[in-house]
Amino acid sequence: MRDDSHPPLRIYLIRHGQTEWSLSGQCTGLTDIGLTTVGERESGSLVARLCGTVFSQVLVSPLQRAQRTCELAGLGAVAEIDHDLVETDYGNYEGRYSADVRAEHPAWSLFRDGCPNGETAGQVCDRADRVIRRLRQRSGNVAIFSHGQFGRALAARWLGMPVVQAQHFVLDTASISILAMASAQPEVAVIALWNSPHGIAADVTDDDAIRVADRERRSAIQRWENEGGDIQRTPPSARAGKPVSEAHEHGSRVGIGGAQHGFRKAC
């Protein structure tokens, strides 16, 4: 029998909107850069995409690009800053073009090698694990506004994969992903939705989608084991999003209520 007082945990992982450096391909870690006009528009579209979703908690990185995205999504008033959600520290590579770094170091992998005078892959992994431990104490829907590289690491660690496997995940600006537990196997972590782009509603509740994600997760891990610890292609995901109806395209009507059951987007 379902315990409505402790609904299952579903983590809405939301990457910030576009910045000048995400557009240009520059390594963006702790530089506190703002959103572009496009980034503001992308972030505003989150209002309709999250419309009707009740959140028991909203967490946000301390960097302004994540906080502004959270604000434009209508959740800024109830958000709590979590410093562990900050982007990876690129150290000497901060502000450099990724293509230039790889031209100098062709074998370089952020999630294996880390960055000189920045974070190591192990430190990023530790941060992700701390976030996951805290989130596992929660129930219901939790929204977290974070960053591209750290979000990828968080997803890999959520599935119990080595952090280096984050290189196989793609996370676009203002995308929504959902990390959850399999309904039939509540001890099994799954990705219920990944990198959902603009125009797709993110409130996925279909148990079939979670079961598919569970099977595909196990398949990905099996490939990783069979191939000596390196998955050769991006782990599949359950893309169970549905088109946003025109009735939800009214982002100016946003309200936040701190009701006992959480914070709901007003439609």
Image (cartoon, helix red, strand yellow):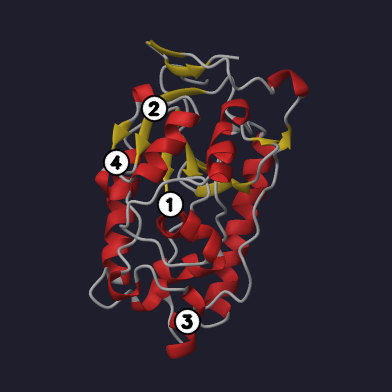
Cα–Cα gap, marks 3 and 4: 37 Å
Cα–Cα gap, marks 1 and 4: 18 Å
Q: Earlier in the sequence, mark 2 or mark 3?
A: 2
Residue 163 on image: x %, y %? 40, 66
- The residue that label 2 is drawn on is 76
In this view of the protein, can residue 186 be seen by the observer? yes
Q: Earlier in the sequence, mark 3 or mark 4?
A: 3
Amino acid type for the residue under numbered disc 3: Asp
Between label 2 and label 4, give the one nearer the viewer.
2
> Dot 2, crowdedness within 10 Å: few (<14), some or many (≥20)?
some
Amino acid type for the residue under numbered disc 4: Arg
Between label 3 and label 4, give the one nearer the viewer.
3
- The residue that label 1 is drawn on is 147
Cα–Cα gap, marks 3 and 1: 22 Å
Who is closer to the viewer here, 263 or 93? 93
Which SS class for mark 4?
helix
Residue for point 48% across, 43% down = 13
Who is closer to the viewer here, 97 or 154? 97
Which SS class for mark 1?
loop
- The residue that label 3 is drawn on is 100
> Dot 3, crowdedness within 10 Å: few (<14), some or many (≥20)?
few
Residue 95 on image: x %, y %? 38, 68
Cα–Cα gap, marks 1 and 2: 16 Å
Cα–Cα gap, marks 2 and 4: 21 Å
Who is closer to the viewer here, 267 or 161? 267
Residue for point 49% across, 52% down = 19
Q: Earlier in the sequence, mark 2 or mark 4?
A: 2
- The residue that label 4 is drawn on is 134
Is 241 rendered above or below residue 24?
A: above
